[in-house]
Amino acid sequence: MESLFAMSASTSLLLCAALVVAALFLADRARQARASAKAKLLESEYSGDLQPPPGPHAWPVIGNLHLLAGYAVPYQAFGDLARRYGNVFKLSLGTTPCVVVNGLANIKEVLVAKGAQFDGRPNFRRYHELFCGDKENSLAFCDWSSVQKARREMLRAHTFPRAMSARWTQLDGLLGVELDEVRGRLDAAGPGQAVEAKPLLLAACANVFTSYFCSKRFQLNDPAFNDMVRNFDRIFYEVNQGYAADFLPWLLPLHSRHLSTLAGWSHKIRDFMTDEIVQERLDSWERAETAEDYVDELIGHVRGNAEPAITWDTAMFALEDIVGGHSAVGNLLVKVLGYVAAHPEVQDRVHEEAVRAGVVQGKAVTLADRTLMPYTEGVVLESIRLISSPIVPHVANQDASIAGHRVEKDTLIFLNNYELNMSPSLWTKPEEFMPERFVSPEGRLSKPEHFLPFGGGRRSCMGYKMVQYVCFATVANLLNEYRVLPVQGRDYTVPIGNLALPWDSFQFHFERR
């Protein structure tokens, strides 16, 4: 009986093993069948059944670059071409295959619904030169990766401080310090003196950013600090320009000296950030439960061997990228002043709104007043709308589709937010400066769905809250306390199509109210 029992047990085990093997085999066949069906579906969606977008015939060598000539803003050409070929159409810029996307639904398809399929960035040589030979060092111009995701997560707590939180209160205080410095300089100049707005506002914004993210403030007469501000602004101006050589690589030898200059600016910024901000922190760093600032966050991630692993070089580029954001804010503020200098009635309405919010003489506007001053926020948003700085182009990281059109991997995607910002079908009198369009009848800030000033989805601007906070505080305080007057004989046409301004741009008279 024992022998028979043993044989039965062995047989049972063998039968069980056979059943497990059979189940695994069937599961594997089912998995293969599902994979095959999915592959056939993808093949059908992205090849046979879907057609590429329509578009103009491309010329040899230059492709369709000639179609962008003659426009103040290339994105204006995209709107005209869309009226001929449809909201989604293809172009060849040099040898680079491109798809231009118009219309809110199509743009949101790229940014949100299929954001994971279109999260790459252009592979321009200039971008590599700006980041020591590898654009993946950049927050804005890198392709999506686990490292990029980690860098964004580390930034989130610092760039999105919750209202009334400790970091929000800290930022409010730092804004107060720098705006006091601006007031002192304006009052010292006097009402009859023309003031170069850009150097003054860039320095103030730079100190807000270094104080907030790095816990380090600099004197405005510090030569090294001023060189840093100037070099960041040079790079910001550079990345806002379009070059034919981005699409015609054979022109790059003509830009070799310029590319070398770009690399030099980057190296000088690295030296400043290392010597003046980071090295002392590295030498004295000790692990703590909470990070003091963004520098602390980066050091903790690298030295704590956190995952995904990032090198110290990568961490430094992330720090430089976010501190360099002050250039975008400073340039935007100068353009806002360019608009309001031509609209004294707008300045008066901001002043009246501040008074209604309880900002009496001798009291500064704070971030706590922001919800009570929607018109002031509208001044900033209306400036952003008119400037229409383009959304950074995306790149398809796989074969995909947009609005039912086939889009191949590595295609560069232009998202035409200019048309969203300037279409008469979406805005009343779109060419006019009308901040009240962002205030609802109930007196609240109101942004229409088709207004996408900071992009959207996983590649949205990580610093947009900083833009809103710094711009609100600066515009509200300046217009509440001063009249911003044009200098006679100067041109105050605000350039559109990007945020960057030349170093020598607008001068203003600041007259105390």
Image (spheres, rainbow, N blue to C red):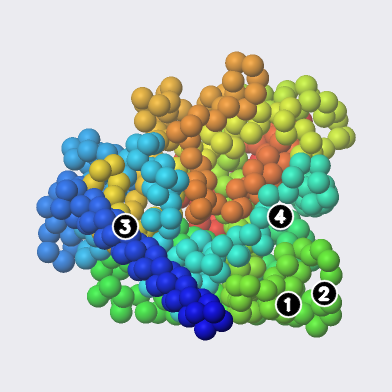
Residue 451 x %, y %: 48, 35
The percent position of residue 156, horizontal first and vertical second, equals 66, 55
Tag 2 secondary structure: loop
**Local SS, label 1:** loop
Q: Is residue 22 left or right of residue 299?
A: left
- What residue do we see at 15% from left, 53% from top? 48
In this view, the residue in front, 482 or 132, is 132
| Figure quadrant of residue 213 | bottom right
Give the residue at mark 4. 157
Which amino acid type is shown beneath numbered disc 1?
Gly
The reply to whether callout 4 and callout 3 are in contact (CB within 8 Å) is no
Q: Which mark is residue 287?
A: 2
The reply to whether residue 321 is in sight is yes
Helix, strand or loop at disc 4? helix
Residue 10: percent from the left, percent from the top? 48, 79
Q: Which mark is residue 304?
A: 1
